[in-house]
């Protein structure tokens, strides 16, 4: 996903407290349930898509939205995330080796529109859509106060883990706790040794921290550490979003950078609170020192990160 696309996408997400709401709305087909889907008020940037094989029939797709992972083998077709309505048909039609076959599964890494907005496109060609048990509720909660079009929800959910054999490949998904949202999962293509982290990874970009959707920065740090302990160092990791200079795949070294940024964010805000600074002063920082690769012309993204950290550190515990 290029930087201009990321800026656009950032302006569209409508989870309460996440980012500015769009004023133009559009519908995405569904069978039963509706949740909000935002569309841009202006012209879209030029759409560039790419299918990139990784290994053993597993690859990634980039277009508009979170990075898609895919498995294509003679035995099975599996897709992780569905991006937006504009790119979902491109992904579905161009999926390597599909040839009109039904997909065995679509897996949503979490509830955000840029990862689930294409569910309605994939649903007629897919046997099941899988996600963590929190995802349908988060999708519905995000839509309670908005007049958005309908979106297709997952029809298979799990609480801790999910695993299926797909011919010569096994695909597993695990939930380790709140992080970027309250429903983030990690997907492992076990034989190919490829791990999809969804939006647990914004590779050298200021991330979205969706507190309204259950985000927890301290938990996010812990999830990245757990992932590095749980999954092999020689795995290929797919990231939800990335600075084009670094790309949408990588390894533990990239994950450590993300972890260190989140830890530094909390430490910076905690120091400001201890010094008696008001929230308005703490969140006024434009770029975070020591993380120059994250600097990008994203509208107030660092300020939103600092605000989320402040709210997390000052919230009353019940």
Image: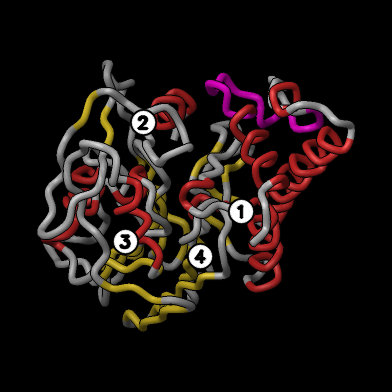
Which residue is under mark 3?
136
Q: Is mark 3 on a helix, strand or loop?
A: helix
Looking at the image, is mark 2 or mark 4 nearer the viewer?
A: 2
Looking at the image, is mark 4 or mark 1 nearer the viewer?
A: 1
- Lower position in the chain sequence, tag 2 or tag 4: 2
Q: What stretch is highlighted in magenta?
A: 289-302
Residue at (18, 71) in percent of width and height: 127
- For label 3, count other residues whose C-alpha is less than 10 Å away and answer few (under 14), some (14-19) or many (20+): many
Q: Position of residue 308 (x, y in %)?
A: 62, 40
Looking at the image, is mark 3 or mark 2 nearer the viewer?
A: 3
Left or right of residue 114, residue 121 in this image: left
Left or right of residue 272, residue 38 in this image: left
Which residue is under mark 1?
216
Q: Are marks 2 and 1 in contact (CB under 8 Å)?
A: no
Q: How far is disc 2 from disc 4 in space, using C-alphas? A: 24 Å
Q: How far is disc 4 from disc 1 in space, using C-alphas? A: 16 Å
Q: Is mark 4 on a helix, strand or loop?
A: strand
Which residue is under mark 2?
12
Residue 9 to residue 145: above or below? above
- Lower position in the chain sequence, tag 2 or tag 1: 2
């Amino acid at each position: 996903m290029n930087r201009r696309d990321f800026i656009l996408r950032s302006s569209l997400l409508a989870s309460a407290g996440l980012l500015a709401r769009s004023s133009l709305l559009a519908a995405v087909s569904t069978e039963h349930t509706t949740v909000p889907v935002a569309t841009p008020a202006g012209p879209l940037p030029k759409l560039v898509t790419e299918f990139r094989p990784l290994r053993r029939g597993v690859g990634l797709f980039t277009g508009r939205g979170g990075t898609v992972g895919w498995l294509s083998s003679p035995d099975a077709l599996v897709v992780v995330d569905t991006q937006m309505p504009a790119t979902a048909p491109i992904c579905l039609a161009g999926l390597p080796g599909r040839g009109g076959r039904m997909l065995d599964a679509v897996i949503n890494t979490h509830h955000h529109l840029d990862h689930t907005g294409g569910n309605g496109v994939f649903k007629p060609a897919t046997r099941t859509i899988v996600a963590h048990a929190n995802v349908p509720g988060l999708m519905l909660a995000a839509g309670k106060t908005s007049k958005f079009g309908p979106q297709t929800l997952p029809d298979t959910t799990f609480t801790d883990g999910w695993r299926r054999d797909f011919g010569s490949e096994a695909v597993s998904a695990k939930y380790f706790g709140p992080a970027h949202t309250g429903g983030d999962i990690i997907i492992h293509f076990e034989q190919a040794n490829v791990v999809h982290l969804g939006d647990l990874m914004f590779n050298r970009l200021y991330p979205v921290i969706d507190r309204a959707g259950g985000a927890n920065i301290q938990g996010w740090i812990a999830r990245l550490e757990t992932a590095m302990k749980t999954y092999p160092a020689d795995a290929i990791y797919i990231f939800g979003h990335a600075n084009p200079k670094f790309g949408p795949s990588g390894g533990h070294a990239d994950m450590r950078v993300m972890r260190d940024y989140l830890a530094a964010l909390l430490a910076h805000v905690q120091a400001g609170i201890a010094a008696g600074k008001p929230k308005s002063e703490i969140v006024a920082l434009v770029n975070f020192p020591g993380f120059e690769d994250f600097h990008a012309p994203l509208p107030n993204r660092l300020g939103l990160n600092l605000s989320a950290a402040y709210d997390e550190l000052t919230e009353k515990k019940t």
